Image: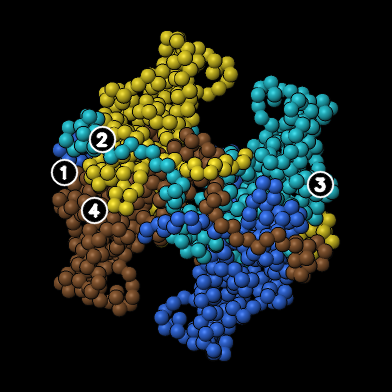
Chain colours: A blue, B cyan, C brown, D yellow
C-alpha cells in the first residue's frame, strides 16, 4: 500500500480530542482546569474517548468493567513478560509496554466479541426480524458454518460465570442493558438451547465486551479500555520485581527440556553446505 | 551481569499482588467479586499498587493527579507516534505500547522529581535540621554543583502554574500535603528567593510527582500512574486515526529538508572502499 | 481461553535453538566460538531460524531480500514513530520497539503473501493438477469470491517493479526459484491475462515473501526477517534524531485542523448528564 | 520541557538517511537498485548508519560483532518475555518489540561501556599524556571514586573471556584495533595490575562495545546493533513458541510462593478506610 500525500495547503491532520493554547488546554471542549479533581479518572476516560460527559450510571458501569479483571497473578502472560523485561531493563515504561503487547487473540480479547456484537446488531436492525427469531437463525447459521460465537465458555464455570453475572446485574440496575447487549444474550439463550450446550456461560470477557458496546464504544476502544484496566496490576508487579532486585530472570533449567542436536562439526557442515573455505 | 539461578526446591518467584484459585481471584487478599463495582478504578489502582484500600481523601487526590494531564493534542510525541504506528499496523495494542515507550526523560518525567523528593526527604530526616534551614542549604548546594532542581519552571507560566495550583490546593484540602511535599515546597521557596528566580513556578509534573510521593508511591510507581493517566487520551487519538482510515501516514515532503549527497557512484565507491569485484 | 498448566514433573518448556553451559554456548548444536567471525550475520540468521547452515546460494538470496527495502525516508510510519518516541524518551531501545510495532497490515506485510503462497502451494500439491491449470482456476475462484491476491500491484510501476525484478533474477540465478514461487508466478500470469489487469506487477513485498517461502521460512518468520531488514535504517534515523537534540517533536500547528467544539460549560453539562453537585 | 515550535517556512524535519522519488529510492545517496544483492546486509547496515560504504575489513569485523552473542537459550530475559507475549498475542511483531525493550542496564549494555570509552578517549586526547600513564591515573581515579569500569568481569571466565578474545583477535588482524580500543585495553591492564584484580577479564559485551566504538559508532548506535544482533535468535524462539501452539504461558504454581494476606474482609476494611457505605 502506498502512503497518501497531502494536497497543497490542506492540513495533513485533523483532531477533535484536545487543543492547546499557550495558557490553556481544552479537552473535548472543556477547560482542563475544570476537569482536574472535577471528574473521576473513569468519567474523564469516557469523556476523552466518547467526546461527552458520562452520566453517573454510565460511570458506575464503566468503573465496574474497569475493575472486572484487575489482576491474574503470574498466570497472565503479559504480567510475566513485564517482569522478565524489567529484570533486564529496569524501566517501568518498558515493562508496561511489554504487558500491553501481550493483549491479543488469546487473552482479554474483548475486541473480537465486540466486533461480533456490533456487526450482528447492525444485521439485526436491517433484518426487521423479531429478536428471538433472529438469534435462533444466527445460532443455526453459525453452527452450520462451524463458527464459534465469541465470548462464550469458561474452563471452570458452568451455566454462570460469577464475575460476568455481577457485571450484567450492575448494567441492568443502571438501565444500561441496551439492545445490542440484549441481542447478544438472546443469541446465548438460543445457543444454550442446542443439545449439549446448556452449561455454557457467557464469560467475563464476553460480558465486558457486551457492556462496553452497550455504552457506545467501538471494538478497538474496548481493547484500549481492557488494556488500561489491567495496567495498575502490572505496575504493582513491576514494582514488586524492581524491589526484589533480582536482575536477569531466566527460566530455571529444571523447567526446560533442551532438545538440541549434540555438538555438531562446524567445519565439516560448512563444507557440506557448499562453502569452499571460509565464506 | 549474570542471571541468578535458583537453588534446589526454593520457589523461583514470589508475589503478593494477587492469587488465583479455580473459582476465585484474590486481589491483595480481597475477593475480586467484592471489588467489581465496589471500588472506583482509581481506588482499585491504589489497592493494587499499595496493597491497602485508600481512604476517600486519598482516592480524590489520586483522581485529581490522574486527570491533571489528560491530553495534549498533537503536541505530545507519544500520541503522534501512536497515530503513525496504527496508520501502518491498525492495532490498538501496538499504538498504546508506542505511546507508553515515549514517556521518559523529556516528558511526563515524574520519576526524576519523585526520586529527588524521596531521597532529599530521607536526607532531611537524617539531618535533624529545621525544614527551612535544610531547604536553604539544599538549594545552595545544588546551585554550587550546578544541578537542576527537577519539577520547576514552565515556558509560559510565571510564579504559578494553574494546573499545579489546583492539584496542590486539593491535596491540602484533603489533608494530604505531607512532609515530603512540604519539604519540596520549602526548597522551591528557597530557590525563588535567589536573585532572578522569583518567577519560577513548580510545574504540573513537579506537583504530580510531589503529591504521589506524599501518597506513598515509589518513583517508578509515579511513572506507572503517569502512563496510565495519559492512555485514555491515546485511545481517543488512535480511535480517531483508525476512523480517518488514512493508511500509512508520512511526513509531508513540504515539512522535510532532505540533505543527502546526490547520486553517488556505487561501483566506483565500492572499489575505493577496497572491494575487488562484488563482495 | 485458559492457560495450560503443566503436569507433575514434565518440563514446562522445550527449546532447540541454543543451550548454555557455564563455559560454552551452543547455537543450533554449534559452538558459538566457531561461529563468531566464521559466518556472516545473514548466514547466522538463517542457521538460527532454520536450524541448519545455509548454502552460499541461500545466503546470497537472503542477503538480497534483507537489502531490498533498506529505508524509505520519512515516508515509512515506523521510522517517523521512532523519531517521535526518542524525541521524548531518548532511548535507542524505545525507538526500535516503536518502529517494530509499526510493521503490520498496511506495510511490509510479507506475512499475508507468504501465508497465501504457502497454503495455495499445499492445495496445489494435493490437487494433482498441472500448474498453469491450477493457477487459472485459482485466479477465477479468487475473482469470483472478490478476494485480492496479495503481493500484486504498485502505485507507480506498471508491468514490472524493478526491485522485485532484481530479487527474482537473483533467486533464479542461484537456483532458488522453487516450486511455491513458480506457482505464485503462474498465478500472477493467470491474473494478468484477465481483461484490464495486464499492467499489474508483482511488487517488492510480494517477491520478498515469495523468495522467503522458497527458502523455507514460515509466514511469521518472513515478518521477523522483514522487521530485521528495516532496523539498521531505523538506527540511522534515531541516531540522526538524537544528534539533532530537538526534544519533544510535535506536529506543527500549520499541519493540523483542530475541530473541537468551542469552550463548553463544564458545570452546566455535568448537571445535564445527571450529576447533582460534584460526583 | 516544552516542545519546540517551528518558525514560518522553515522545514520542521531534516534527514540525510534516504530519499524517495516516485521511481527510485536513494539510500545514503546510492540507488537502492544497486545495493540489492550488491552488499551483504552487514555492509548495508554500516552504510545506513555511518553514511559510507565499509571496507571488507570493517565488514568482517562488524559481522563478527553481530555474531558474538547470537542466542542465550531461555537464560536471556528478553527471549522469555517474547515467548510469553506471543503465547497470548500470537504476533511476531509484538514478540520482537518485547525482546527489544528488554535490552538495558543489566543485559547487552554495550551503551554504557561505549560511552565510557568514547568520553575517556576524548579526555585522553585532551590530556596530552602517554597512554599507559593516562590509564594508570584513570584507574586510580575510578577506584578513589568507587566507580566501576564498565565491560570488565565475568561470572565464569578468569583472565580471558574466549568470545571476547576471538573478537579482539579478529579486529587486530583486520587492522581495526584503533586508539580508543587500545586505550580501553590499557585501562584494563592498569586495572588488573591492582591487587586482587589480576583475574578479571574484559567480557564479551565490553569487547563488542570497544570494537564498535573503534569502528566509529556512537554509544546509542552500539545498542542498536546489539539489538539487531539478537533478533534472529528471538525470531527462532518465537517461531518455536508459535509452533508449540501452547496458548497462554503462565508461571507454573510450583515455581511461585504466593505471599498474600489471606481472605480479607472488604466491607469492614472499607469502613475502616473511612468510606461510609459504598463510595
Q: Chain of mark 1?
A: A
Q: Where is mark 2, residue-wise?
A: C38
Instruction: Say yes or no: labels 4 and 2 on the same chain.
Output: yes
Q: Residue at x 42, y 23 (%)?
A: D201
Give the Cα distance between marks 3 and 1: 76 Å
Quadrant where the image shows the C terminus of chain B: top left
Q: x%, y% of residue D12?
A: 49, 43
- What residue is at 54 percent from the left and 42 percent from the top? D7
Residue corresponding to mark 1? A274
Q: Residues within 10 Å of mark 2 (few under 14, many from 20)?
A: many
Q: Which of the 4 image quarters holds residue D162? A: top left
User: Picture coordinates of residue A81 (x, y %)?
Assistant: 51, 50
Above/below status of D58 relative to D86: above
Label 4 sits on residue: C162
Q: Which mark is residue A92?
A: none
Which residue carries the number 3 mark? B169
- Camera-nearest label, 2 or 3: 3
Instruction: Return the chain for callout 2.
Output: C
Asked if labels 1 and 2 share a chain, the reply is no
Give the image location of residue A154, x and y in percent.
55, 71
Q: Is residue B238 visible?
A: no
Circle 3/circle 1 CB separation < 8 Å: no
Kindly identify which chain the residue marked by label 4 belongs to: C
Q: Is residue B138 left or right of residue C43?
A: right
The answer to whether the residue labelled 1 contacts the one labelled 2, judged by CB atoms less than 8 Å apart, is no
User: Taking the image as drawn, is residue A6 in sight?
Assistant: yes
Q: Nearer the viewer, residue D6 or A201?
A: D6
Amino acid at each position: 500500500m502506498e502512503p497518501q500525500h497531502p494536497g497543497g495547503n490542506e492540513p495533513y491532520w485533523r483532531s477533535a480530542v484536545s487543543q492547546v493554547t499557550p495558557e490553556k488546554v481544552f479537552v473535548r471542549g472543556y477547560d482542563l482546569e475544570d476537569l482536574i479533581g472535577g471528574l473521576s479518572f473513569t468519567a474523564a476516560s469516557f469523556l476523552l474517548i466518547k467526546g461527552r460527559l458520562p452520566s453517573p450510571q454510565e460511570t458506575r458501569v464503566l468503573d465496574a468493567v474497569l475493575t472486572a479483571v484487575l489482576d491474574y497473578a503470574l498466570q497472565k502472560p503479559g504480567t510475566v513478560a513485564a517482569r522478565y523485561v524489567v529484570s533486564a531493563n529496569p524501566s517501568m515504561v518498558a515493562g508496561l509496554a511489554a504487558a500491553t503487547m501481550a493483549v491479543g487473540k488469546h487473552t482479554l480479547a474483548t475486541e473480537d466479541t465486540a466486533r461480533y456484537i456490533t456487526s450482528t446488531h447492525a444485521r439485526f436492525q436491517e433484518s426487521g426480524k423479531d429478536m428471538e427469531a433472529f438469534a435462533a437463525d444466527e445460532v443455526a447459521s453459525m453452527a452450520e458454518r462451524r463458527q464459534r460465537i465469541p465470548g462464550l465458555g469458561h474452563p471452570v464455570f458452568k451455566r454462570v460465570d460469577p464475575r460476568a453475572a455481577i457485571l450484567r446485574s450492575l448494567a441492568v440496575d443502571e438501565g444500561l442493558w441496551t439492545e445490542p447487549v440484549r441481542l447478544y444474550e438472546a443469541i446465548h439463550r438460543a445457543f444454550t438451547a442446542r443439545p449439549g450446550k446448556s452449561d455454557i456461560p457467557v464469560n467475563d470477557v464476553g460480558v465486558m465486551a457486551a457492556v462496553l458496546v452497550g455504552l457506545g464504544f467501538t471494538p478497538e476502544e474496548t481493547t484500549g479500555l481492557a488494556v488500561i484496566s489491567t495496567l495498575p496490576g502490572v505496575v504493582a508487579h513491576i514494582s514488586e520485581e524492581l524491589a526484589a532486585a533480582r536482575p536477569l530472570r531466566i527460566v530455571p533449567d529444571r523447567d526446560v527440556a533442551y532438545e538440541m542436536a549434540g555438538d555438531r562439526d562446524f567445519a565439516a557442515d560448512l563444507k557440506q553446505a557448499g562453502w569452499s573455505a571460509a565464506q
